[in-house]
């Protein structure tokens, strides 16, 4: 049968592909057919029909579990209306509209019917502008709504981001993309999965205007497009990409065309690139088709795969990347090969799958990132534009802080504590974290404390900080009342952590207790409590594993998963734990392995699933791993910190899987780690100032029921502390009390740190965090830290008292024109890198270290140098 449509310029082949994938999803989601697909029985236009088909065809399984078709129809209708209402709507080509305007999802955020809400905020501000200016104006609006703060892995929705007024870069860019799409401008979230020259990663936004894609820093406006503090770091990236949930034809380079998504490589828009080809062979020299090739770089003390590509029929996998070092690992049928490469050396590499056992001993390797490069010179902005931009930033900050002033304050928290009889300090702690949701949280405490005492507060304290911003009374009631009815004879700590707490991993908190308590008979519930393995076997036989989008993990609503009868692996694991907790069975995901466990007889047991439910096939006896301190380490050896300078990983099917422990965990020598038996690799690394990492692998095995001792060692980097210049002590600065002081008076005579900062920007906020985390060792040195802010960067909202954890000898001062900055900051690359500009000074006022712009780890590097020159 020939299909015909004029909607979205779809050709016959594309329509057939969409119909085929839609039928797959209808079969997969048969258990929720009416809730999802009943909207097709409504009176729909041709465009509405095909827009819905397109969304359903590529929809993640978790969305089919968690949301109804009515939400998607509302989204489609509002988006099509907006296309007609905005002046550029018809200028946006259909293929861009489908892929970068119509989608309802940006990242892994909770989906809300927000398109019309955002449109109502932005339409009048933008419709009289050019598309390019509308992008800039939208980012000024985003700046009014939110600013940067580091947070956990869960991505909050755009509306929650607005309620919270802050979020990490992935959430800022989710808000900005959603905002741009809400006025019909194609937009996409782009990111570097991991930096090569420092730890962490970053996400920003690309938006399309009249034939060209531009980039912006989300919620961090600039006076023009294609400008941001991350521009210099992006020129050192090894991959910058985005995922599109469709069969996307380009024209960008396609890194991976999966059945359910397309990954496109945008690196060449930011940095020099080279396409490398890896030929994978077996031991007889034959090409291996279907091998998986991992392109890995060092970041956060692990070798992280920034891309994983299958080999083609010729045994080849090609990848466009930057001019740095990579560790390449190829895996197939239980065999693997591994090779460290320097991309600048060649564009073709061969690997042989000849390993089935890991080596013994240690292996050292250097990982060199792409070098710093200068960007193209941009035409200077006029003074008028600069002034207008600074005014807009100040106005936006005032709007945002004015909104933040509406949050419940400490006095109101104390009043609530008096009403409810709850401890004032703890009440204020949860209300301050709830921010724009503080009145909802206060209402819950006021309503429930009389009947349940401290338990409502205990429930709130069991949540992650971010949960307090988007969890509401109905949900809290379900978990409070539903859990207290199941407490039984559990100890308080066990009950709070593993029954009362609804948080399992990084999923959205939703009601599910009453639902699961009603889903099983009393007899079934008693059987499950007596032997939770019976519940595991029941679920194993009734639910199906469905994997589609590998970056959509752990977002399934347990009730939706139950109704759909399937989910991805992590969502099914969360689902099992949620049912157990609903029935009063203590349950968790193992702290490092993230596998479902239940408590029985006071000890933890693995949930055993024999079929495809979660692919956790059998319970294993655990072993233990004890890290041993290197007593002969040099004084400059870094203090052990998990995910900062060491990790360990277990070998599974030829791939090393890094174990999950809290980032920055330092008590690593105190107790052995409980781990599964197997082959392990300990990775340690020392990052040098230029971004190069001196890495070390230590290989060992852990046996069931036994303890393995492994010494944690680091390679010894040569400490080079050159003299880079001299600081002028005579420069005059202004203290916060209005006193004029020279820089020399502030820094003293024994060495110091001086940093010129821009408090509203993410790079400076990273520096604040790092200095705060190092408050204790800085206190031991007793070195002054002088943080200097120019008048144009000192916004009315900036309050130094908001940073109480900074080292005790930290002082904020003002420099009206930044005249005290050393001259070489005006030169590239420091000038382009931007704030903060940090200097370590010795007792002779000599500059011994400097760092500019975004660089994770600056705080530790500065501390190390200061320790070396301190007198």
Image (cartoon, rainbow, N blue to C red):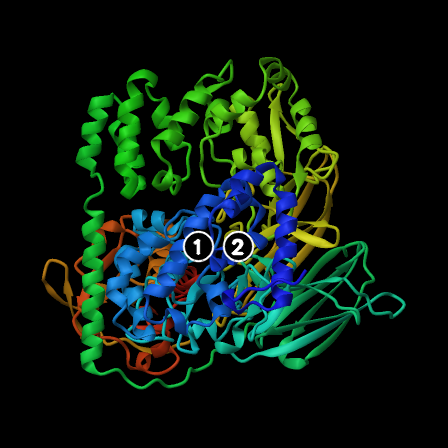
Q: Nearer the viewer, residue 29 or 303?
A: 29
Secondary structure under tag 2 reads helix
Q: Are marks 2 and 1 in contact (CB under 8 Å)?
A: yes
Residue located at (59% from left, 31% from top): 576
Tell me: residue 155, above or below residue 500. below
Residue located at (41% from left, 39% from top): 464
Label 2 vs 1, first from the N-terminus: 2
Location of residue 123 (image quadrant)? bottom left
Q: Nearer the viewer, residue 620 or 62?
A: 62
Left or right of 293, for residue 36 = left
Secondary structure under tag 1 reads helix
Please provide percent x and percent y for residue 375: 42, 82
Location of residue 591 (image quadrant)? top right
Q: Can the viewer see residue 41 in this picture?
A: yes
**How many numbered marks does the figure carry?**
2
Residue located at (42% from left, 59% from top): 860
Q: Quadrant of the C terminus?
A: bottom left
Q: Which residue is mark 2?
A: 55
Sort mark 1 into few (<14), some (14-19) or many (20+) by Cα contacts within 10 Å. Answer: many
Please provide percent x and percent y for residue 718: 53, 69
Tell me: residue 135, above or below residue 171. below
Sort mark 2 into few (<14), some (14-19) or many (20+) by Cα contacts within 10 Å. Answer: many
Q: Which residue is mark 1?
A: 76
């Amino acid at each position: 049968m020939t299909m015909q449509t004029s909607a979205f310029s779809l050709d016959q082949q594309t329509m057939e592909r969409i119909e085929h994938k839609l039928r797959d999803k209808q079969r997969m989601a048969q258990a929720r057919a009416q809730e999802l697909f009943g909207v097709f029985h409504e009176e729909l236009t041709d465009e509405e029909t095909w827009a819905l088909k397109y969304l359903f065809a590529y929809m993640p399984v978790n969305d089919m579990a968690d949301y109804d078709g009515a939400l998607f129809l509302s989204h489609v209708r509002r988006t099509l209306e907006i296309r007609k209402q905005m002046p550029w709507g018809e200028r946006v080509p259909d293929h861009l509209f489908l892929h970068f305007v119509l989608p309802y999802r940006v990242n892994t955020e909770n989906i809300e019917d927000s398109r019309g809400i955002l449109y109502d905020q932005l339409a009048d501000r933008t419709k009289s502008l050019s598309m390019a200016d509308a992008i800039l104006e939208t980012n000024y609006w985003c700046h009014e709504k939110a600013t940067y703060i580091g947070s956990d892995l869960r991505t909050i929705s755009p509306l929650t981001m607005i309620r919270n007024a802050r979020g990490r870069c992935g959430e800022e860019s989710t808000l900005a993309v959603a905002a741009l799409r809400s006025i019909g401008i194609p937009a996409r979230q782009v990111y570097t999965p991991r930096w090569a020259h420092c730890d962490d990663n970053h996400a920003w936004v690309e938006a399309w205007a009249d034939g060209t894609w531009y980039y912006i820093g989300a919620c961090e406006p600039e006076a023009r497009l294609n400008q941001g503090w991350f521009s210099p770091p992006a020129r050192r990236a090894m991959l910058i990409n985005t995922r599109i949930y469709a069969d996307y034809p380009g024209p960008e380079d396609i890194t991976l065309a999966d059945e359910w998504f397309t990954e496109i490589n945008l690196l060449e828009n930011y940095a020099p690139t080279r396409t490398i080809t890896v030929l994978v062979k077996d031991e007889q020299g034959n090409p291996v088709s279907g091998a998986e090739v991992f392109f890995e770089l060092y970041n956060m003390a692990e070798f992280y795969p920034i891309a994983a590509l299958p080999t083609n029929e010729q045994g080849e996998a090609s990848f466009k990347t930057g001019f740095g070092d990579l560790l390449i690992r190829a895996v197939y049928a239980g065999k693997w090969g591994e090779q460290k490469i320097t991309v600048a050396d060649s564009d073709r590499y061969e690997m042989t799958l000849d390993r089935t056992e890991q080596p013994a001993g240690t292996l050292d390797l250097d990982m060199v990132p792409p070098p710093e490069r200068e960007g193209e010179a941009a035409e200077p902005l006029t003074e008028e534009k600069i002034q207008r931009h600074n005014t807009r930033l100040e106005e936006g900050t005032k709007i945002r802080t004015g909104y933040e002033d509406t949050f419940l304050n400490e006095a109101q928290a104390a009043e609530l504590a008096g009403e409810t009889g709850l401890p004032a300090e703890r009440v204020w702690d949860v209300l301050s974290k709830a921010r724009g949701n503080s009145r909802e949280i206060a209402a819950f405490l006021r309503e429930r404390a009389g009947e349940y005492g401290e338990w409502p507060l205990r429930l709130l304290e069991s949540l992650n900080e971010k949960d307090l911003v988007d969890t509401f009374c109905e949900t809290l009631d379900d978990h409070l009342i539903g859990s207290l009815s199941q407490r039984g004879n559990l100890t308080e700590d066990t009950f709070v952590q593993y029954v009362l707490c609804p948080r399992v991993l990084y999923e959205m908190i939703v009601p599910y207790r009453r639902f699961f308590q009603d889903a099983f008979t009393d007899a079934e519930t008693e059987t499950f409590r007596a032997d939770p393995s019976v519940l595991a076997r029941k679920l194993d036989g009734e639910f199906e594993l469905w994997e589609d989008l590998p970056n959509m993990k752990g977002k399934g609503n347990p009730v939706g998963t139950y109704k759909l009868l399937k989910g991805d692996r992590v969502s099914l694991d969360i689902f099992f734990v949620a049912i157990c907790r609903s029935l009063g069975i203590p349950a968790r995901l193992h702290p490092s392995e993230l596998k479902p466990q239940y408590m029985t007889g006071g000890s933890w047991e693995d949930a055993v699933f024999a079929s495809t439910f979660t692919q956790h096939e059998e319970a294993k006896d655990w072993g233990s791993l004890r890290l041993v301190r290197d007593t002969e380490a040099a004084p400059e050896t870094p203090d052990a910190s998990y995910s900062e300078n060491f990790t360990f990983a277990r070998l599974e099917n030829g791939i090393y899987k890094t174990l999950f422990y809290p980032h920055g965990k330092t008590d690593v020598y105190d107790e052995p780690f409980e781990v599964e038996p197997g082959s392990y690799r300990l990775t340690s690394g020392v990052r040098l100032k230029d971004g190069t990492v001196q890495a070390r692998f230590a290989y060992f095995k852990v046996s069931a029921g036994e303890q393995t001792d492994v010494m944690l060692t680091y390679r010894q980097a040569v400490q080079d502390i050159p003299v880079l210049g001299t600081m002028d002590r005579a420069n005059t600065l202004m203290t916060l009390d209005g006193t004029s002081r020279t820089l020399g008076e502030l820094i003293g005579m024994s060495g110091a740190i001086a940093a010129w900062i821009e408090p509203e920007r993410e790079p400076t906020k990273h520096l604040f965090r790092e200095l705060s985390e190092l408050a204790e060792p800085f206190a031991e040195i007793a070195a002054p830290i002088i943080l200097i802010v120019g008048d144009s960067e000192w916004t009315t909202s900036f309050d130094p008292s908001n940073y109480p954890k900074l080292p005790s000898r930290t002082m904020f001062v003002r420099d009206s024109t930044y005249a005290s900055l050393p001259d070489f900051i005006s030169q590239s690359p420091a000038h382009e890198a931007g704030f903060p500009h940090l200097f370590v000074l010795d007792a002779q006022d000599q500059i011994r270290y400097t760092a500019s712009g975004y660089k994770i780890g600056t705080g530790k590097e500065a501390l190390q140098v200061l320790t070396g020159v301190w007198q």
